[in-house]
Amino acid sequence: FLAMHYTSCIDYSFDSVIHIMRDVNYGWLLRYLHANGASFFFICLYMHIGRGLYYGLYMNLHTWNVGVLLYILVMLTGFVGYVLPWGQMSFWGATVITNLVSVMPYIGETLVYWIWGGFSVDNATLSRFFCFHFLFPFIILGLVVLHFLFLHEGGSSNPLGLNSDLDKIPFHHYHSYKDLLGFFIMLFMLVELSLLFPNMLGDAENFIPANPLVTPIHIKPEWYF
């Protein structure tokens, strides 16, 4: 829905976000849910990773490796999405992070030019990031299915570390109801944050249109990076 009103052009992207916020019916709510939802997604993701480390899930290499790929793709999705509003922090964050690729030996400079679509972060970069922000979730969805397949093949972990089928319980309804309860609690917190403190997790610099001639004093990524 947001993509219907967003324009991936450096001259109009910032204004298109303002248009979504002010002119589109409930556009402000959808945008805040989308932006803050990314933070809540990462909260759940980091809790999942912490649980996996605590229970030693890394012993199941196939499931763990797919999970690592998922984490990298989710990070990339969050990064390219953060660039789309084309505020000051969006532009300079994209400039700093993409320049890190240039330190790779042999292919770094060529790769960063390909990412930019030119010799600097510009209109082609924004268009490519907009496409990536659409494509990555579909790849993530496929990897999630693969993650579940490997998980069901080896079985989920448990706090007791039991390998026998004797004490195992079915996922539904013992765990599915707990997952639903957790989902609704997180959804309630997300809606509360989006309605009461929508900009708490944002950066003040990103309320200023991108200006390549003015560098912010502190260039920092979102908290989940």
Image (cartoon, rainbow, N blue to C red):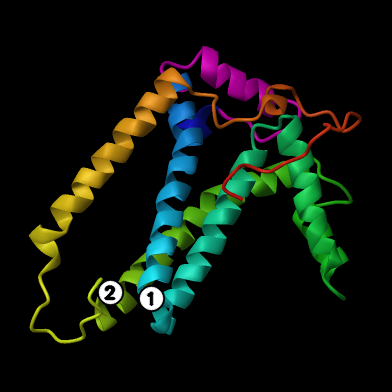
Left or right, 11 with reference to 47: right
Residue at 54% across, 60% down? 73
Give coordinates of residue 81: x percent, y percent. Answer: 59, 43
Residue at 16% across, 56% down? 176
Q: Amino acid at mark 1?
A: Leu
Which segment is the magenta one?
6-27
Label pair 1/2, CB-CB below 8 angstroms: yes
Residue 8 lies in magenta, yes or no? yes
Q: Residues within 10 Å of mark 2 (few under 14, many from 20)?
A: some
Mark 1 and mark 2 lie on one chain; the one further toward the N terminus is 1
Looking at the rendered structure, the secondary structure element under dot 2 is loop
Give coordinates of residue 215: x percent, y percent. Answer: 87, 33
Q: Residues within 10 Å of mark 1 (few under 14, many from 20)?
A: some
Q: Residue tagged by mark 1?
A: 57
Residue at 82% across, 70% down? 104
Residue 219 lies in magenta, yes or no? no
Q: Residue tagged by mark 2?
A: 157
Give coordinates of residue 43: x percent, y percent. Answer: 44, 48
Q: Pick whichever, 100 or 119, lies toward us.
A: 100
Q: Quadrant of residue 206?
A: top right
Seen in the picture, residue 85 relative to 207 is either above or below; the reply is: below
